[in-house]
Amino acid sequence: RAKPVADEYRKKALDLYAKMLQSGLKANDLLEALYIAGFYSFTLGSVDDAKRYFDQLKSVETIDPKTKERHRGAPYLENLAKEVLEGKADDKVRFANQMN
C-alpha cells in the first residue's frame, strides 16, 4: 500500500479532476480526466466510484483525426481501466532502461 503522503496527494488530485469533469472538457481531455479520476478512486479504495468513472469512458464521442469518423469511447483507455479493476495496474513510474 502506498505511503499516506501519496494518498493525500491523490485525494487532492481527485478533487481537482472531479471539478474539471464538471467544467465541460473536450473529448480527449474528458477521456483522460475520467481515466485518472477512476484510477485514483480505485487506488484510494472507492471501487464503485472508479467503475462509475470508467463506465463513462464508453460514451465519450471522439473523432478520428485521420478518417474524421465519429466513434464512442476509447478502447485503449477502456482496456487500461479493465486492468485497473482486475488489480493488474499500478502507478509506479517505469523507464525504458529499467527492469519491470
Image (cartoon, rainbow, N blue to C red):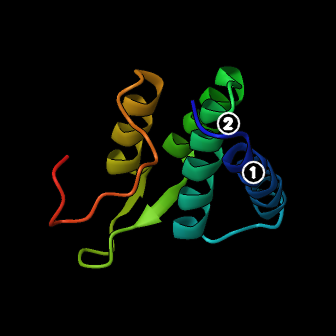
Amino acid type assigned to the residue bearing label 2 in the image: Ser
The reply, left or right, for residue 52 in relation to residue 29 is: right
Looking at the image, residue 85 lies above or below residue 25: above
Q: Which residue is mark 2?
A: 41
SS type, badge 2: helix
Looking at the image, residue 44 lies above or below residue 19: above
Q: Where, by quadrant of the figure, is residue 96 drawn?
A: bottom left
Image location of residue 2, percent across then percent down: 59, 37
Marks 1 and 2, how far apart in space?
7 Å
Amino acid type assigned to the residue bearing label 1 in the image: Leu
Looking at the image, residue 1 lies above or below residue 37: above
Mark 1 packing: few (<14 Cα in 10 Å), some, or many (20+)?
many
Residue at position x 82%, y 67% in the image = 23
SS type, badge 1: helix
Q: Which label's residue is closer to the chain start, 1 or 2? A: 1
Mark 2 packing: few (<14 Cα in 10 Å), some, or many (20+)?
many
- Frontmost residue, 94 versus 19: 94
Circles 1 and 2 in contact, beta carbons < 8 Å: yes
Q: Where, by quadrant of the figure, is residue 42 drawn?
A: top right
Image location of residue 69, percent across then percent down: 33, 66
Looking at the image, residue 95 lies above or below residue 83: below
Q: Which residue is mark 1?
A: 14
Image location of residue 43, percent across then percent down: 60, 34
Image location of residue 71, percent across then percent down: 39, 55
Q: Quadrant of the N terminus?
A: top right
Q: Residue furthest bottom?
A: 66
- Frontmost residue, 73 versus 13: 13
Residue at position x 51%, y 68% in the image = 28
